[in-house]
Image (cartoon, helix red, strand yellow):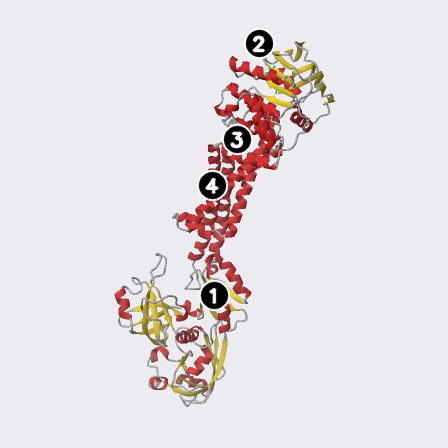
Amino acid sequence: MMIQLRNVSKFYYSKGMIASGISRVSLDLDLGEFVVITGESGSGKSTLLNVISGLDSYEEGEMYINGEETSHYVAADFEEYRKKYIGNIFQNFNLVNSYTVYQNIELILRINGYNKAEMRRRVDEIIDRVGLSAFRRTKVSKLSGGQRQRVSIARALAKDTDIIVADEPTGNLDSESAEGIVKLLSEISRDKLVIVVTHNYDQFEAYATRRIKMHDGKVIENILLYDTGEAESGGSSRTAAAMTAGSTVRLGVRNTFNIFYKFLLLLIVFLFLVFAVSSQYTTFVNKKYESSIMGYNSYFYNYSNDRVVLKKSDGSVFTEEDYTALSRLENIRSIAPNDVLLDTSIYLESDMITLEVFPHSVSEYQGEPDLGRLPEAEGEILVKGSADDLFMSEDTAESMLDQTFSVWMGDTGEMKVTVVGIAFDEAEDESDYSYFGEAYLTEDQMQQMRTDLYGQTSTLVTTINGKEMEAGMGDSYYSVRKSDRVAKGKAVVQEDISNFYLNEESQDMNMKAAIGNDITVSVKNMFYQEKIKLNISDVYDEKTYQAKTGDNDYDMNMGAIFISPEDYSTLFDKGNFQCSVYLSDLKEADTAIKAIRDLGYVALPMKDASIQADEDIISMIEVPIAILIILAIFIISYIVAGLILRSRSTYFSILRMLGLAKRNIRWILEVEVLLVANIAYAIFLIVVACVSRDVIAIAYLKTLVQFMQPRDYVILYLFICVMALLISDWFARRLFRKTAMGSFREEE
Ligand code: ADP
Ligand code: MG
């Protein structure tokens, strides 16, 4: 005996009420039977059918399947049972409308782990049997109701189970289609147990072998119309196999594309996600970058963002070896040895024009001058700047060529230079300081200027007869000047200094008392200290000033100590304590700076020298905003993707109805969403490739491409994949919150 029910009852609990679905039902049903269950609405027909097919549990009595008692069965056992014994035919067909006839039938075989060849053979055979060969490749949505019910029967047959259950299989059909379906079911019942629920017994009368009538949850009539005898189980004893990985992927891929609008919508969601997240990220990076350019810099004048200022960690002078080592590093565009001059502008002055320029060594110059040539000998200079702003016009620039200019740095150190080359430099935007230009000089002159700069910026203390006198800030007293009229080791000082050597009691005003005495001059600046001892060889006054010093501006330099150029060099020509390198790729700045520090230098990147608070404020405000925006993008995508997937819940309920396990459904869903995510990402990469090859010219995308690094692409990809998995798992969880029967009922 296939199915035996002994006093089986099923109750429904809803809203505190207990309703009886079926009560104390006893039945014996066997293979070969065509059982027709009738009864008025609410009499318990569906409940009985669902209990028999293991969709619903029962509370009282016993049910035997093939002689096996089932009261100890848990959900998984019933799932097994359904897979092995039950083929379902539904009133509303429960077919996948976007699948073809073939695919719908094949689906149940995939779920049950059939292999490819077996599937093809069985599906074709069954399509033939239900008379749908002509519609093999037709989508179910194009079929009539009768044809759909045939597909649904074909699907129930495909698995070759012993029991076929059908709840109102003709309920949605016209009488002619219904006739065909009934005939088909009766044919099937020859070697199976077919149980049909109907409220239209007349349709089945001619074929039914048993009639069961229900009323108020009880069987009130159970008539055997024909004795079918002992039918042999024609069903396979095939134990249900799990769905294969191949089938999972196959179904996932099929589902991705089979509803085009759904695919398109989901694709748009993921494209939105990829572009929104990446552009939000790059805008953030870009803002940080721009703020570091624009950040006001209080120490350095030349604050170009690619500049990194270096010192040696022991505070010593840079040597050729240092420059060589630095130039070997990657990402170094150029090295400016005379760094201290980079922040000091000089004036080029003639009768005609005065220009303010920043001095550079000619070795830093790149490219060819527009007019003339590069400086080669001492006293030659190349001037570079905007034609309109620095030179006023190209003509003025041209007229400067071969002219001699005075160079002024601060208030001392006049040099004569000849302009041998002119280069035009067009300012890129308003914010560029195009009023200033650049001057390129030979290394000797740079060195001379650096020496003068140390001379101007050091603190000088002169010890005269035991008294320490500091050089004044506003005047020239006790400051140091070089003169080629003074011999090495000697000093020529103003006659007032003699006062330090006069005896207090002495009335004798000997203005030459200083001569022959020693003084020491000590120099101190941020880089070094130096001290020399000099012997006063002469004193000057206003009248003898020019003859003794060679200088003719007494008002400007009175009180200064004149020393020989050699001693001046000893004090101030100390080499470079600070140099700057320029980076070629700003995005890789951190790597380059690390490499520089690893070589043992102290590095101050100009981009970090901007006032720190600015960047802190950016981080404080921008980071949470960026996170919030990315979160919002995330949630929007999540919700929209969920809504799109909701339209698919019918499909997944069908899979559940057909007995597919939760995890298989989740995998199919994951394959589907991941595939869309990957397509979206591929499109993103193609767009990026087009932008970087200038096929597409959209400014916003250009910035995006510029600031995305390989690492960011990987992170973005992982983010998109995780997002896809989250969406599919979230949806799968919602789907499984209801039982198979629950989601089935919702479809009814
Ligand atoms: P039929 O299929 O003959 O119309 P059913 O088997 O659907 O009858 O229902 C039998 C009885 O069980 C009815 O009284 C019905 O109200 C009740 N019932 C069926 N399903 C549920 C349910 N999910 N919750 C509560 N009561 C239910
Ligand atoms: Mg019903």
Tag 1 secondary structure = strand
Rendered residue at 63%/30% (across/down):
112
Q: CA distance from mark 4 to mark 1?
A: 43 Å
| Viewer-nearest residue: 612 or 321 | 321
Task: Identify whether 309 is placed above or below 405.
Answer: above
| Residue carrying label 1 | 309
Residue type of the residue flagged with mark 1: Val
Tag 4 secondary structure = helix
Residue 30: image quadrant is top right
- Looking at marks 4 and 2 on the same chain, the residue that comes earlier in the sequence is marked by 2
Q: Nearer the viewer, mark 4 or mark 2?
A: 2
Tag 2 secondary structure = helix
Mark seen at residue 202: 2
In terms of image quarters, where does ligand 2 lie? Answer: top right
Mark seen at residue 271: 4
| Residue carrying label 3 | 646
- Looking at marks 3 and 4 on the same chain, the residue that comes earlier in the sequence is marked by 4
